[in-house]
Image (cartoon, rainbow, N blue to C red):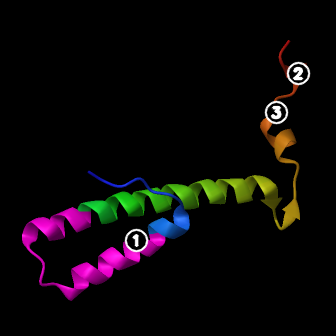
Amino acid sequence: MSTAIKDFESAIAELEQLVKQLEDGDLPLDKSLQLFERGVELSRYCHEQLGAAQKRIEVLTERGELKDGAALLSTDDSTRS
């Protein structure tokens, strides 16, 4: 059973620890597979978090200038006729 992921920073820290354990070797195959599976789970979580942060940044900035995110996401009522 996998442990819940708290946040990005803790996921990165755990992933680094798992990589170190796997690189050190001397683990039974079953334990190595468990660590690898957890690593994949953590990696996917981190990738999703980074993607969400990138989207937020793209909404907030365009060519280095702050933009109104609400205006970018709302639809114009005059085009609904």
Residue 70, x across and y down, in percent: 84, 41
- Report the front residue among 52 and 41: 41
Disc 2 marks a residue whose amino acid type is Asp
Does 51 sit above or below residue 14? Answer: above
Instruction: Give, as a three-letter code, the residue at label 1.
Output: Glu
Relative depth, front residue between 7 and 80? 7
Question: Which residue, as the protein is rendered here, is positioned at the far bottom?
Answer: 24
Q: Quadrant of the C terminus?
A: top right
Viewed as shown, does residue 41 lie left or right of 70? left
* Residue at 16%, 70% in the rendered image: 32
What residue would you read off at disc 3?
74
Q: Which residue is mark 2?
A: 77
Look at label 3 and name its amino acid: Ser
- Residue that badge 1 annotates: 14
Measured as percent of width and height from the top left, residue 54 is found at 64, 60
Q: Does label 1 or label 2 sit earlier along the sequence?
A: 1
Q: Residue 12: give x, y in percent of width and height.
A: 46, 71
